[in-house]
Image (cartoon, coloured by chain):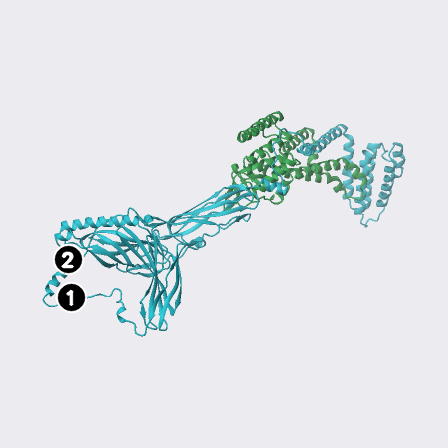
Amino acid sequence: MSGLVARLLGDAKRGVPAAVATIGLLLASAALLGAPADGDPDEAAAALARGNRLARRGELDAAVQAYGAGWPAGGAAGAALAYNLGTTHHRMEQLPQALLWYRRAAELAPGDPWVNENLELARAELAASRYPAPGLPGRLAAHPAAAPLAAVLLAWTALALWLLRPRLLRSAHRLPEPLLRHAWAAVALLSLGAWTVAVALAAWGPRPAVLLDPCAAGGGRLEAGSEVWVTPAGDGSWAVPGGPPGLVCPATAVGAVTVGGGR
Amino acid sequence: MRPAPTMRARLALAAAAALALLAGSLAAVPAARAADVRVRAVLEPGEIGPGDDAFFSIEVSGGVFDHVDFSPTFELVNFEQVGGPARSENLQWVNGVTHRSTKLTWRLRAGDLGIAAVRRISVEVDGERYDLPSRQARVVAEPPSSRRRPLAGQPRPPASPFPGLLEDLWRQGERRREAERPQVRLIAEVTPRSPWVGQQVTYTLWLYTQTSIAQVNTKELPEFRGFWVEEMPRRDDTPTESVELDGETYYRTPLLQRALFALRPGRYDVDPAQVYLVARLAPGNPFATLLPRSEQIERASQPLTLDVRPLPAVPPDLAGSFHGLVGDLSLAARLVPSELAVGDASTLEVKLTGRGNVAGLELPTPRTPAAVEVMRPEESGGNQLDGTTVRADRTWSFPLVPQRPGTWRLPPLQLTYFDPAAGEYRLATAGPLVLRARRGEAQAAAAGGPMLHPLKNAALPLEGAGVPPWRTALPWLFALPWALVLTTVLVRRRRRAAEGPADAADQRFAQRLAVATAEHRPRQSAIALETAWRELLEETHGLPRDLPPSRWRRHLEATGVDERHLAELDELVADLHYLRHAPELSSVAQLSGELASRSRRLGRRLTA
């Protein structure tokens, strides 16, 4: 790796475009892993106010429409919108939808006690099944910051090793010289690997979802309100790796908790 | 002699009118129910011998048409019950009024000479008690034989009471009476004749007549052993039909109809029905119409045989849901209400309708999730008559009580029945149903559990809310070290490209060290190492080319080289000296490699 970099950078004419391309690639993947767009906070606040007025008048269907106009949104406004959408659906006895919006609100405001208590109430009333994240990809997806954080830590470690390499070569006589010379490259490779895993999981890995309608196929069946992990299965449908074998649900039956997937 | 056609037509009209009157009177039964009930006790004969049998009967009669149920009690004195009670029912229609009587008869055996009696006779009819006087008989040594009655149904051969000269006149009278004898027949029908077990068989007792009937009394009816029997009361609109039978025109009306359901397969005999009729005699002369005469006649239907077929084997996948139902049935179910609070009760109504006999059917308890408790059902409805068809209309109401909140799916209810028309098993299905149980407010308050929080009025920032800032910065934190490395490498490369010679000296030094390491002879290896050093120091520190290694230190001190590097260089020079004078055959590869490595590091520090 270090040789490759050295060869690429040995020639300034080739090195500069290569460096620019590498940084661009990293930034593109960073966008994929980045936080959801915050949207327009003013628009979200206005949607929240409109929805609240309609909800107070008892026009719950219209309130849902009004809240939805401000979504997606991030931050406190997005959390409040998602929470109010969940509460409105809850009042309308549309528990799967309520569960989905509570989950979205909990993603944006994990420590909000109202969100968590309403979420648990909806879960208790639904009594639908919750399926764990499937396998190692599922466990990694369950902690979406783990892989990017590891990649960052490894990248900075590689940078430190690279900067300290001459001093290490001078002072650490007991360690083999090839190790001292190439340690930074090995750590850099690990960092890139961790980042690649994070990007792949974001693009094709499991993600949390709530079934808004019953989903049945091939002898397996999941009830509406089931909390599952889904992966893209092509044609807009979603596979449920932790559910009954071979179960694929249509896009209309799946509500992805993270913004940008499902309906 | 048969009546003339005109006379026959008049008789037929009279018969139709009489039958219509009969039908109308039978339809007027509810009004007659209120009539008085009469209870009668009879002990016969009045004198019997010791050990002879007497018959004690209690008869309940009145203007009732439905089945009469009563329970008598009595005490026996000098009698021993040896048989009974035998039950017989009698239906009488007299002048437009229907009477039904039920009689229970016991066979009693007399004891010693003297008085034998039945005392404290008490009968309870429809909740009302009737106390009757005692009945007694004398037990005598020689009972009168004349009191013995002839056996029922024993033919009585007609005999002329006027032998001799009046014999011819008697014979003429007999022929005339024969001609006037009413043409009345009793015919029993069953359909179908080869039913399946459980399939409805309709038994009809038809009265065919060409004369008017004034009174009908039943003498004996079939018992239909081996069948579940549903009575079919006469309806207001029971038609009187004109039918041809053996070339004769008759009017007919059903006297009795029963729906029979065979309990087991096999061959069953249906006994003949016997009735007494009071029929008008056909007038043989014009003056007879002025004084119409009637005669009591007895008629019996023909015996019938039913061949009941067993049901075919139940398919294994339907065996669990088959409970003996036969007919054409459908199942419906609903939940009332389908949404409720925990602890409240919903009612699962299961309704079974269609053709068939559902009496005695025990519906299995529906399967429900463990969190939904099922109570014992209330049952309503049963068999109902639709014309001559027995229809099922039965409802089971199961109270369901959810024990915890949730949306509970009740699996479909399934009942398998045998369709006799198709000759195969079919499945009646209802559901599935969904029961939504929400947490009751009282329950939530009692449990201290959370209630639904209200809407938020504004997007107020909360502590701990939102995505942590470091998460949003992760991509930049990842890209930054890579950018630093790339930038630094580029800058260094650019600087080295500008400096040029130093890099060239380094590269040559490295090449010579590599040559020295590859040399396996110690002296030549030491010379190569020394030469590499000499050239490097000449280029970087201006070392004179012919200056011996022992004097390198003094020259380098003058150029300001660090003392630590000089000390290391002294060690290196000493080791080179040792290598130069090592025996030719000794293995110095390890020492040579170590010296090259130390030289590489020291050279890098000296040129840095």
The front one of A27 and B228 is: B228
Q: Is residue A80 above or below residue B335?
A: above
Q: Is tag 1's residue or tag 2's residue first in the polypeptide sequence?
A: 1
For residue B278, which quarter of the picture? Answer: bottom left
Q: Which residue is mark 2?
A: B179
Mark 1 burial class by Cα count in 10 Å: few <14, some 14-19, many 20+: few
The front one of B235 and B327 is: B235
Q: Colour of chain B?
A: cyan
Q: x, y (%) of residue B602?
A: 82, 38
- Side (left or right) of B320 relative to A116: left
The front one of B62 and A236 is: B62
Tag 2: amino acid = Ala
Q: Secondary structure at mark 2?
A: helix
Q: CA distance from mark 1 to mark 2?
A: 20 Å
- Which-is-in-front pick, marks 1 and 2? 1
Which chain's residue wears label 2? Answer: B
Residue B548: assigned label: none
Q: Which residue is mark 1?
A: B161
Q: Is residue B26 visible?
A: yes
Circle 1/circle 2 CB separation < 8 Å? no
Q: x, y (%) of residue A178?
A: 74, 42
For residue B579, which quarter of the picture? Answer: top right
Q: For the C terminus of chain B, which image quadrant?
A: top right
Q: Residue furthest bottom?
A: B141
Q: x, y (%) of residue B180?
A: 16, 56
The chain shown in green is which?
A
